[in-house]
Image: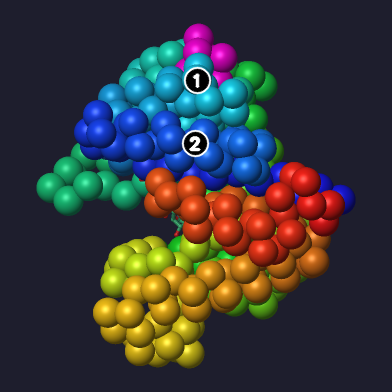
Amino acid sequence: MHTPLSCEFFPPKSDEGALKLRAVTEQLTSALKPEYFSVTYGAGGSTQDRSFATVQAIQTESGVPAAPHLSCIGSTRASIAAILDQYRALGIKRIVALRGDLPSGMRDPGDFRFASELVAFIREHSGDWFHIEVAAYPEFHPQSANARADLLHFKQKVEAGVDGAITQYFYSIEAYARFLDDCEKLQIMIPIVPGIMPISNYTQLARFSDASGADLPRWLRKRLEAFGDDMDGLRAFGHDVVTGLTSDLVQAGAPGLHFYTMNQAVPVINICRDAGLMPSQPN
Ligand code: FAD
């Protein structure tokens, strides 16, 4: 059995970062043969030019298809239509459709309130050209009123024309398993691919988790905190935790694995190697 892998990047801020990312995509391509590389997009178009340049470079140079993220909050229908046309002209076939979060200081939500409206608009504008992925939250979106409401909103989003979903990262496989059960009960039949965040920097991970509502379990937080300045120790421990989670997800039949790379190749390659997921290792 082969588990498809995908890797996510953020658009680099400098030419030096772009060169580094090119080396990272080369390393990941030759080691893992990923299904696609996705590129994040700042809500309100804040990283639009850099995202487009990164998508273009990946699509034309890496040999792996690029999948741009597209967030709709703060945007107009006309501006989203123009971006969709630009991506289509580049031969892009997959989009990760998101609502995003309004950047501080920006008040006008624009023409879209939720990702479901963006999905419906992509179908209206581009038909079935794009394979559409959306975000899913096994530990629930931080703004949702309750778990049930969030699940029903997720169902509504899927029914707008979605092909697959990628989850927010998590470290509790039970949360993912329960989320899949709940989706099955609601007849949500799309593949829901777990998002995996390697652990290499505690401060950064704690900040992301606080902002996104992704749960950093107490036992894990306490252990990571205890490493203090011992970055090598923290990375070795984080590697073991995430490799174990990755193996368990594959054993449980996850339909794919999506890595939040933070623009780093080595942690992802090492996890895949030790979880037996290199293309040369049958899993
Ligand atoms: P939605 O699916 O619209 O949900 C947002 C909230 O609204 C939820 O609480 C939901 O329950 C609620 N809701 C939905 N529909 C309704 C309704 N009809 N009535 C009332 N409430 C409703 N952000 C970026 O800015 N750029 C990126 O590139 C990016 N990439 C991401 C990739 C992945 C895999 C993930 C998991 C997240 C990503 N994000 C990104 C973060 C995401 O934009 C935020 O989590 C954002 O707050 C929600 O986006 P969404 O698409 O999940 O929104």
Q: Which residue is mark 1?
A: 61
What is the span of residues highlighted in magenta in the rendered image? 87-92
Ligand 1 within 8 Å of disc 2? The answer is no
Residue at (30, 29) in percent of width and height: 50
Q: Is residue 139 above or below residue 125?
A: below
Q: Is residue 141 above or below residue 231?
A: above
Amino acid at pointer 1: Glu
Ligand 1 within 8 Å of disc 1? The answer is no
Q: Which quarter of the rendered picture does the C terminus lie within?
A: bottom right
Question: At which x and y percent is residue 36?
Answer: 60, 35
Q: Which mark is residue 25?
A: 2
Question: At which x and y percent is residue 38?
Answer: 50, 37
Name the residue nearer the viewer: 120 or 239. Answer: 239
Q: Secondary structure at mark 2?
A: helix
Question: At which x and y percent is residue 244?
Answer: 65, 73
**Colouring rule applied to residues:** rainbow
Amino acid at pointer 2: Thr
Q: Is residue 36 at least partly visible in the picture? A: yes
**Going by the picture, which residue comes out furthest to the right?**
1
Question: At which x and y percent is residue 23?
Answer: 43, 35
